[in-house]
Amino acid sequence: MSGQRKFGVPVGGAFDLESMKLANYLVGNPVESSVFELSSAQAKFQAQSKGIMSVIGANCLIHLSAQQIESNATIPLALGETITIGAPSEGSRVYVAWSPGKKGSLMQLAELPISVSKRNHLRLIHGPQFDSFQSTGLNQVFTVSRSGNRVGIRLAESIGSHTQELPSEPQSVGTLQIANDGTPIFIGPDGPTIGGYPKVGAIISSDIGRLGQLAPGDQIQLDWVSLDQAYEINRQADELFRRLIALYDLSLSMT
């Protein structure tokens, strides 16, 4: 498959890992296979062999010949067929998986992935500097600014400037830092592994995909949970994903 714009991501490099896994699963690829990640952009692909494509994640329109299809679908393509994937209307990132030579049928998912439909609600555990900022407005509704990419996502509202100077220390994807001007910044998958801004929290692993689906102008609420609660929420999310896969297996076996 060739694309006018290519946004291939390496194994494990997707911002919305659940959508990436689902995209691969629906076309019969190993779930950790590389995919195309389209971030708030239109893309056009041409099939260099017959096969089946999945387009999973943000809500957008797909144009195939005279057909118009909504995303979160599997789409069979013939040799030489061209498909255009529009920019998202809800959510931010679309994952495209391709399985050449594999037969399939047009299938539409019944609902958007949770990472898209629930993206306005992020659950976090406390970070090492949480106590210094807990009374400064971390529970307000925030707006996603236009300054965001795979390195990090900045929120528009300031919770108050500060002068805390910290030695650089490890941080991971989903870490919530507070810049000197008081604006919160979430670290993305291409972000630095160390940082000196105060770290007030970290998004629980099952909600990282929600962070990846945030678009400029989205409003979000932060929900603080304990470490034990985070473990349980993540366990339930894993179980829900397994149940969804089982339902898809049943659906595919009946078609």
Image: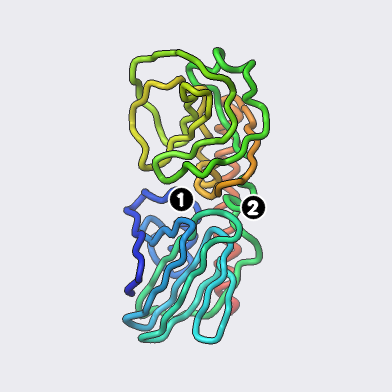
In-front residue for pair 53/238: 53
User: Which residue is found at the position 61% from the left and 67% from the top?
Assistant: 109
Could you say whether the residue bearing mark 2 is in a helix, strand or loop?
helix
Classify 246 as above or below 62: above
In the rendered structure, find residue 17 and report the number of the disc placed on it: 1
* Along the line of sight, the residue nearer the viewer: 43 or 247: 43
174 to 36, vertically: above or below: above
Q: Amino acid at mark 1?
A: Leu
Dividing the image into 4 quarters, which one contains the N terminus? Answer: bottom left
- CB of mark 2 within 8 Å of CB of mark 1? no
Q: Residue at x 38, y 55 (%)?
A: 32
The chosen color scheme is rainbow
Residue 168 in picture, x, y percent from top left: 33, 20
Badge 1 density bin: few <14, some 14–19, many ≥20, Cα 10 Å: many
> Which mark is on residue 117?
2
Give the side of residue 198 with respect to residue 115, left or right. left
Sequence-first disc among 2 and 1: 1
> Camera-side residue: 18 or 87?
87
Q: In the rendered structure, which amino acid carries the disc numbered 2?
A: Ser
Q: How many marks?
A: 2
Q: Is 19 situated left or right of 9 in this image?
A: right
Rendered residue at 39%/61% (across/down)? 36
Pinpoint residue 121: horizontal percent, then vertical percent.
64, 40
Mark toward the viewer: 2 or 1:
2
Secondary structure at badge 1 equals helix
